[in-house]
Amino acid sequence: MHSVLPKNKRRQIKKQQPSRSKKKLKLPAFFPDATYGSIHSLPFHEVNGLLPGVVVTTLHFHLLGLVSTLDTVGGFHNFTQFPQEKIVLSDSGGFQVLSLINRKGLGKITEEGALFKDPKTGRKTLLSPELSLQIQHSICSDIRTALDVPLMGNEDNSIITKALEQTTRWAQRSKTAYLASELLTPDEFIATKPKLEENTLSFERPLLNAVVQGGNDLALRKESAQQLSAIGFDLFGFGGWPVDENGKLQTKVLETFVENTPPDSLKYGMGIGTPDDIVTCISLGIKLFDCVLPSRNARHGSLFVTKGSGEKAGKNYDLIRIKNARYQFDSSKLDPACSCPTCKHYSRAYLRFLIKNNNPVGYSLLTLHNIWWYQNFILEISP
Ligand SMILES: [Zn+2]
């Protein structure tokens, strides 16, 4: 593409582009979500040492007008000083568009892409597979995602089939756009695929993730997994909600996803989940996760704590709902087994007081604990 920037500026940009160095991701790994460019109410420097990576949302960056800034500074790592050796994973934007289309009636899916109206500006945008990959190239993310057609989870099979077929066609276009942006031939893509070992993923170029659809119908899930595997991707994400109406994890659907994607590829449980769901998924061979739970729960005063030290919740964890009156005079730590700064320095009573009064320091401290607790939990259950 022709550049309109003056020559000296172009040289400067080139210099700022991050180098393609070898990266290693220890598995299993859990990435918190950095939706608007940071983890909610928590600066990166507080948790950089702890995190293997973060997930960023492509559509938000586009709608916030951040893409030209990212282009100029050379990507998200440079922009935020998030350590170069850590992984930035970008989603495709499909999930956010679905929410605008289905919940707010602000658009529709067309063959070309997802057409929607920006709820803030009213401007119409077509999020095509090519635009999504172009934004992700500007983010310079380490793991990029092909645009898919997500579902809400209550559709009938004819709608699920239509969505999975559209997802396959968009995945093919996403791969073509990715290869063009990375100046790779299909053969070079295969020759430089990531190396998956027992507990690590090593790679030297940005990776491309395909999102497997098919709802909770085993035959359709298999069909989607096989169609995307035939196109060839670096890793495969489980799209949709693998839970039934009672919130129980659908292990058969997850198994079908794992069995019908290449055995030497990383499997990614997108949006999963509770500590119990993560344990089950790891036993099925899924090793990468992201979820809003730690940060969102923290904002609502719901804290993950070690089994036996809070209110009964799951098989592998308890919860403390810090707003409950029972913590008003509780001078103990949130979680006696946690070594995070929040648990080290503050009592349940104080944290309850902060959150009851909407004190931003309270949100910060509680998010720090939940993010810390999740990383520690993953470490403890790692083989
Ligand atoms: Zn803690």
Image (cartoon, grey):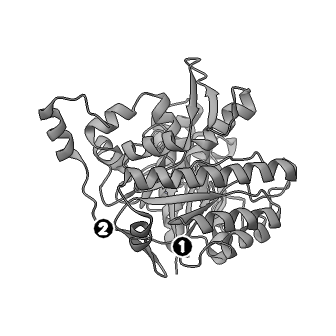
Quarter of the image with the N terminus in it: top left
Q: Which mark is residue 22?
A: 2
- Is residue 300 shown to the viewer in this render? no
**Residue in the image at 68% along x and 68% along y:** 226
**Residue in the image at 39% along x and 53% along y:** 47
Which is nearer the eye, 221 or 272?
Answer: 221
Q: Considering the numbered disc 1 on the image, is that residue within a helix, a strand or a loop?
A: loop
Can you say whether 356 is above or below 176 in the image? above
Judged left or right of residue 108, residue 338 is left
Residue 374: horizontal and vertical position, in percent?
53, 60
User: Disc 1 and disc 2: Cα gap in Å?
Assistant: 18 Å
Q: Considering the numbered disc 2 on the image, is that residue within a helix, a strand or a loop?
A: loop
Determine whether label 1 and label 2 are within 8 Å by CB. no
Q: In the rendered structure, which amino acid carries the disc numbered 1?
A: Ser
Can you say whether 125 is above or below 42 in the image? above
Residue 268: horizontal and vertical position, in percent?
58, 63
The residue labelled by disc 1 is 265
Judged left or right of residue 313, residue 199 is left
Identity of the residue furthest to the top in this view = 122
Q: Quadrant of residue 286?
A: bottom right
Mark 1 closeness class: few <14, some 14–19, many ≥20 residues within 10 Å: some
- Is residue 28 shown to the viewer in this render? yes
Which is nearer the eye, 106 or 188?
Answer: 188
Can you say whether 156 is above or below 272 in the image? above
Q: In the rendered structure, which amino acid carries the disc numbered 2?
A: Lys
Q: Kindly tell me whether mark 1's CB lies below 8 Å from ligand 1.
A: no
Q: How many marks?
A: 2
Which is nearer the eye, 246 or 144?
Answer: 144
Q: Earlier in the sequence, mark 1 or mark 2?
A: 2
